[in-house]
Structure formats: C-alpha cells, structure tokens
Amino acid sequence: MSSKGKASAVLILAAVFLCGSLCGVGGTFYYLKKKRQNWAQHGPRDVYRVQADKMFARLDKALDLSDEQKVAIKKEIGIFSDAAKQLHKDMRPKLRELMSVRTQAIRNHLSPEQIEKFAAMRKRQWDRDRERREKKNGKPAEQKAAETSAETVTGN
C-alpha cells in the first residue's frame, strides 16, 4: 500500500473515531438534559408519583387497558404510592436514630484524636450534603426550613 493510501486510511479511521466520540458525548449531554428536565418537572421529593406514573404508562402500553381499567388501576397504584410515601416518612426518624446509635458505637472504639478526626469527617460530609441540597433546591436549607416552619405556623 502506498503512503498516500495509508494516509487516507488513517484519516478515514480518525474521522470515524471522531464522529463516534462526538455522538457519544452529544448523546450523554442529551440524556442528562432530559433527566434534569424530568426532575425539574416533578421534583426529587415527588419520586413516588414519578414511579407511579411510569408504572401506569408501562401497564397501559403493555396491556392495552380499557378506560374503566385505567381508572381502577391508576387508583390502586396511587394507593400504593401514598402508602410507600408514608412508610418512607415514618421510617426517617427511626433511621436517623439508628444512624446516631451507629455513630456512638463507632466513637466508643476510637481514641480521643480519632474522635476529633471522625467528627471533622462527619462535619465535612454534612456540609457537602447541605451544599448539594441547596444547589438542588435553589435556596439555602436554613431558608427552606424557615419557610416550611412559617407555613406550618400560618397554616398555608
């Protein structure tokens, strides 16, 4: 093969590789943009409703449900979704208590220096989580908590 033919083959391979790379990157950005729009539409705390809607859509498509069946099945899925949401809400305090017990159990096995490092690690993690929540919700967690408590007091 001549050097001109080799150069052409290399250029073609490079072009194919570049096209594949661009498609991969573009596809990833498209997917992430759609995912972000979906969360913006429903909100991260609305995960039970999102899952219920997806489940209903899959069942409707796969089973070709009648209008009567759609109403009944959507109601059943909603009942389950509400129960799962309530269970999650009820479990949060218990889970936090369990995590607190775990933290104390770990501290019982640490030296005073390690306890200080452990506390610093936990504070860094707490701060990272708080920043992530603030970024996701668009406002500081303290401000959101104040608004929630104000709504509770005023009844709105």
Image (tube, rainbow, N blue to C red):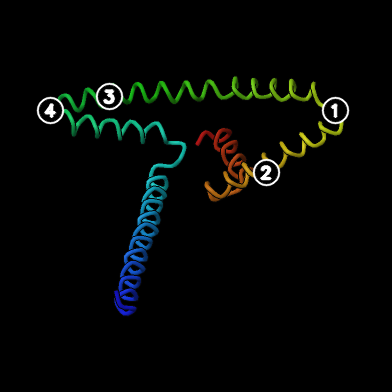
Instruction: Please give the name of the residue rendered at 28% of the width and 21% of the height, measured from the top-left corner.
Output: 76
Q: Which mark is residue 99?
A: none
Camera-nearest residue between 105 and 74 = 105
Q: Looking at numbered disc 1 in the image, what kind of residue is underneath it?
A: Ser
Which part of the image, by quadrant, shows the N terminus? Answer: bottom left
For marks 4 and 2 on the same chain, the one whose residue lies earlier in the sequence: 4
How far is the residue under mark 3 from the one under mark 4? 14 Å
Specify which label sits upstream in the sequence, 3 or 1: 3
Q: Which residue is mark 2?
A: 127
Task: Name the side, left or right, on which 111 lies relative to 97.
Answer: right
Q: Nearer the viewer, mark 4 or mark 2?
A: 2
Circle 1 is placed at which residue position? 111
Q: Residue furthest front?
A: 1
| Secondary structure type for disc 1 | loop
Residue picked out by circle 4: 66
Q: Position of residue 98 (x, y in %)?
A: 64, 20
* Residue 84 percent location from the top left of the image: 42, 23
| Position in image of residue 18 (x %, y %) | 37, 66
What residue did someone put label 3 on?
Answer: 75
Nearer the observer, 19 or 98: 19
Circle 2: residue type: Asp
Q: Nearer the viewer, mark 3 or mark 4?
A: 4
Disc 4 packing (10 Å; few <14; some 14–19; many ≥20): few
Image side of residue 103 versus residue 32, left or right = right
Q: Secondary structure at mark 3?
A: helix
**Inter-mark Cα distance, 1 to 4:** 66 Å
